[in-house]
Image: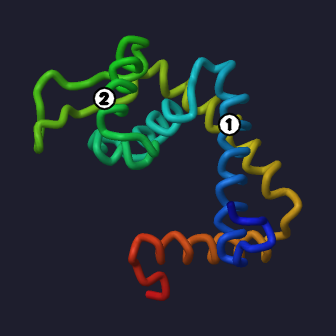
Amino acid sequence: MTELSDRTASEELGVLIKETQAVLNQRMDEVLRPLGLTVPQYACLQALADTPGITSSDLARRAFVSRQSMNVLLQGLERRKLIERSTEPGPRRERTTVLTTDSAILVSRARQAVAAIAEVMSSPLNARDLATLHRLLSTCRDTLRGEDSRH
């Protein structure tokens, strides 16, 4: 087993990012649960609000779940009447999904709750530090994706 002191600075950064993500996910879950939402459900509804007509494959990527899990998630949201799905498949046999009027209000409340968590997380940072952190994390993400973030 690797000792903590044997980790490289890059490994430590990876662990720190994962720990931060886990705590953020936990805090988001805490504020979303009273609204009757899970973090993946919120991510799905938020993506639908931001990008009407988005495919279920893209929804799965945005919610960090598999396509199969997204299908189950969408079925649950449809049963709760938070989304409506077309009966006819579109391109690539995917059905168009839209928010219902009721879910738009829920998404707004959930967005405010999640934004408050993000504010708490970033509150110790000044604007310059926040911009630097955003740029650096974006560079790390883009590098892992195989993208050149300098362009």
Q: Residues within 10 Å of mark 1 (few under 14, many from 20)?
A: many
Counting residues from the start of the chain, the first of labels 1 and 2 encountered is: 1
**For mark 1, what is the residue?**
28
Q: Position of residue 147 (x, y in %)?
A: 40, 78
Q: State the image quarter where residue 113 is shown.
A: top right
In this image, 74 relative to 127: left or right? Answer: left
Q: State the image quarter where residue 49 is shown.
A: top left
Q: Amino acid at mark 1?
A: Met
Residue visible at 72% across and 72% down in the picture? 7
Q: Amino acid at mark 2?
A: Asn
Q: Position of residue 80 (x, y in %)?
A: 43, 12
Marks 1 and 2, Cα distance to the nearest angstrom? 22 Å
Residue visible at 31% across and 22% down in the picture? 84
Secondary structure at badge 1 equals: helix
Q: State the image quarter where residue 55 is shown.
A: top left
Q: What's the image's color scheme?
A: rainbow
Closest to the observer, 22 or 3: 3
In this image, 11 relative to 83: left or right? Answer: right
Residue visible at 78% across and 50% down in the picture? 119
In this image, 99 relative to 30: left or right? Answer: left
**For mark 2, what is the residue?**
71
